[in-house]
Image (cartoon, rainbow, N blue to C red):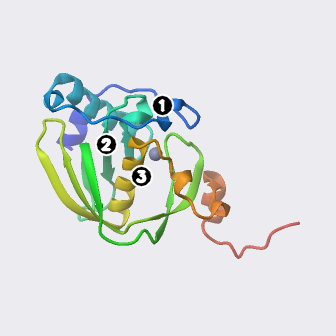
Amino acid sequence: MALLSRAMDGRLRPIIRMGHPALRQRAVEAAPDRFGTRMLRDLGRDLVRTMHDGNGVGLAAPQIAVGLRAFAYYLPGDDADELPPRVLVNPKLTFLDEPTELGWEGCLSIPGLRGLVPRHGLIRVDARDVDGAPLSFEAAGFHARVIQHEYDHLDGILFVDRMTDMSSLTFEEEWDEFGTRKDLPVEV
Ligand SMILES: [Zn+2]
């Protein structure tokens, strides 16, 4: 809880939506002298605060029109699988399997829509925190998915670009109502 309440010190920033050109640009690495500065610490706090406000599990700097390679994410869940908010700067991903795991994704920059996206199920992550401390770990399943989604934002890529079957693109209300049940009778 301490982490969360500190994160709430951040400022709420407007989230830009699909169609804004900044979402399609490649973000640049934070220079070494940026680590530990007020600017990068504030950016991290703002990302976490804005992510929580939007009920998202991740938010990348380009989504608030900041062209730096940084994003925030967290994993909701019960004690064991919960991960408190974390900010990764200048991340590098190494894929440890094929991108064959299908899962549902949404995006704070594409509000109201969800779709099935194939992702790698196991990745290695090498990044820095806002103070420059190295963070290296492996991530699997949903954890790996969230990181790949946020990482794509740093290269100007949105989840819809990764979809291989557009027929799963669904509004949230319909997703809640019908879920993944494709066998429902269709009225014609
Ligand atoms: Zn997104």
Q: Position of residue 185 (x, y in %)?
A: 78, 73
Quadrant containing the N terminus in the rendered view: top left
Q: Residues within 10 Å of mark 2 (few under 14, many from 20)?
A: many
Q: Position of residue 10 (x, y in %)?
A: 29, 28
Q: Nearer the viewer, mark 2 or mark 3?
A: 3
For residue 19, side relative to residue 39 (left or right) = right
Q: Does the residue at mark 2 contact the one at mark 1 (Cβ under 8 Å)?
A: no
Q: What residue lies at 55% left-to-right and 31% top-to-bottom?
A: 20
Residue 43 figure quarter = top left
Residue 88 figure quarter = top left
Q: Earlier in the sequence, mark 2 or mark 1?
A: 1
* Residue 24 visible in the current orientation: yes
In the structure shown, which secondary structural element does the residue marked by tag 3 occupy? helix
Disc 3 marks a residue whose amino acid type is His
Compared to 51, does 179 lie above or below? below
**Residue where numbered disc 2 is placed:** 72
Q: Does the residue at mark 2 contact the one at mark 3 (Cβ under 8 Å)?
A: no
Q: What residue lies at 63% left-to-right and 57% top-to-bottom?
A: 169
Whether label 2 lies within 8 Å of ligand 1 gets the answer no
CA gap, disc 2 and disc 1 = 18 Å
CA gap, disc 2 and disc 3 = 11 Å
Q: Residues within 10 Å of mark 1 (few under 14, many from 20)?
A: some
**Residue where numbered disc 1 is placed:** 22
**Residue where numbered disc 3 is placed:** 149
Q: Earlier in the sequence, mark 1 or mark 3?
A: 1
Disc 2 marks a residue whose amino acid type is Ala
Whether label 3 lies within 8 Å of ligand 1 gets the answer yes
Q: Nearer the viewer, mark 2 or mark 1?
A: 1
